Every structure is written in C-alpha cells, then in structure tokens.
Amino acid sequence: MDDNNEPTIKSLLDKTNLSTFIPEQKVLEKLNRDIGYYKKGMDRPALWLNNDENYNKLLDKAIKFNQNSEFRDKYVANIIKIQDNESPRIFIGVRVEKRNKFNSVNADNMEYNERLNTRLRNILSNYGISVGALTNLEKRMGVHGVTDFDVAKTSAEGLIEMIRLANGV
C-alpha cells in the first residue's frame, strides 16, 4: 500500500495473479519510460552526450531508483554507454534491467564510487583544491586523471583547480 493506503502496482503484481497477464517485458518497459530511458512519446532510447553534467544527472536517477523504487528488489538501474558508429562520440543513458549478480554489483559500485568521489571533493575543497574536468586532448590521449601543479589556476570562487578527472571517474 502507498501513503494513501491504496495498492501499488508492485503489490498487485506480487499478491495477485495479475503478473500472469502482464508480461515482465511490459513492466520493464514502464520502468524504463518512468526513469527516462526512452524519448518522450517514442520507442527510441534517449541518449545524452557523455559529459560530466549529463553523467551526474543520469547517475542521480539511477541511484534514486536503486535506493527508493518499490521494484528495486527485482530490477536495477545502471548507466549505459553507446559508441556512435559515425563518429568517435560516446553517448550515455540510464536503463532499468532485471537484477542479476553482475548488474547488482555494478550498481553498488556506481553508488559507492559516487559517495567516495563526493567525500574526496569535500576533503580537497577544505584545503582549497577543486576538481575539474579533463581537456579534450587529454581524453583523446587516454589520460584518466591529472594533477597539474604547474598550471594551477584560481577559479572564480578563489579555489585552486589542481586535479582534473574524467567523466564519472
């Protein structure tokens, strides 16, 4: 039951034989529509450019689903990466899948890494160090992170940007 003491979809599927009439694929499709995997009104995935801002938005959605959804015991949300066939660009999206050992561990690691990164950013911020993004050249060179003491620059808030990290690393 929900806050208004009305049955939820999950409770109806679990406690009645309704799940025999509604295929699991339809439940997955509904969850993916709710989380934003599909473009509104279309059956195509909504893919975003792989950058820090989009990654953080999708990461937020995935973590909220994995922590709060009434379906979190059977399904898990993860961020997916898709390579563009016509260019070197990589797109990202958030997708709900049936829970298995691999994607459960992946979701747990995703949440753990986010908490760790946030904690590290806060610790570094206390010492006047901010975290920035890698340049396009560094990304193309395959660099995953840089500590740049020679070119440290003061950001608008007076912090020193010394460490640049790749998207989501």
Image (tube, rainbow, N blue to C red):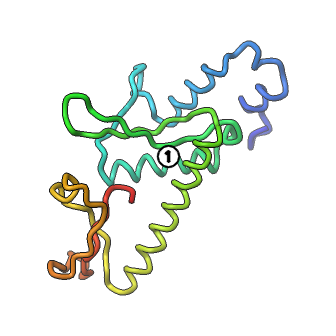
Tell me: 106 left or right of 41: right
- Figure check: 62 above or below 165: above
The residue pinned by badge 1 equals: 61
**x, y (%) of residue 18?**
77, 18
Quarter of the image that includes the C terminus: bottom left
- Figure check: 121 above or below 166: below
**x, y (%) of residue 164?**
27, 68
Tell me: 8 left or right of 43: right
Q: Quadrant of residue 158?
A: bottom left
What amino acid is found at the position of numbered circle 1 in the picture? Lys
Residue at image point 40% right, 53% down: 56
**x, y (%) of residue 91?**
32, 38
Q: Nearer the viewer, residue 140 or 44?
A: 140
Residue at image point 19% right, 52% down: 140
Q: Quadrant of residue 71?
A: top right
Give the structural element (helix, strand or loop) at label 1: helix
Q: Nearer the viewer, residue 25 or 15?
A: 25
Residue at image point 43% right, 39% down: 80
Work out which residue is located at the far front of the displayed protein and give it.
Answer: 142
Quarter of the image that includes the N terminus: top right
Q: Quadrant of residue 48?
A: top left
Work out which residue is located at the far top of the displayed protein and give it.
Answer: 21
- Figure check: 97 above or below 20: below
Residue at image point 15% right, 56% down: 137
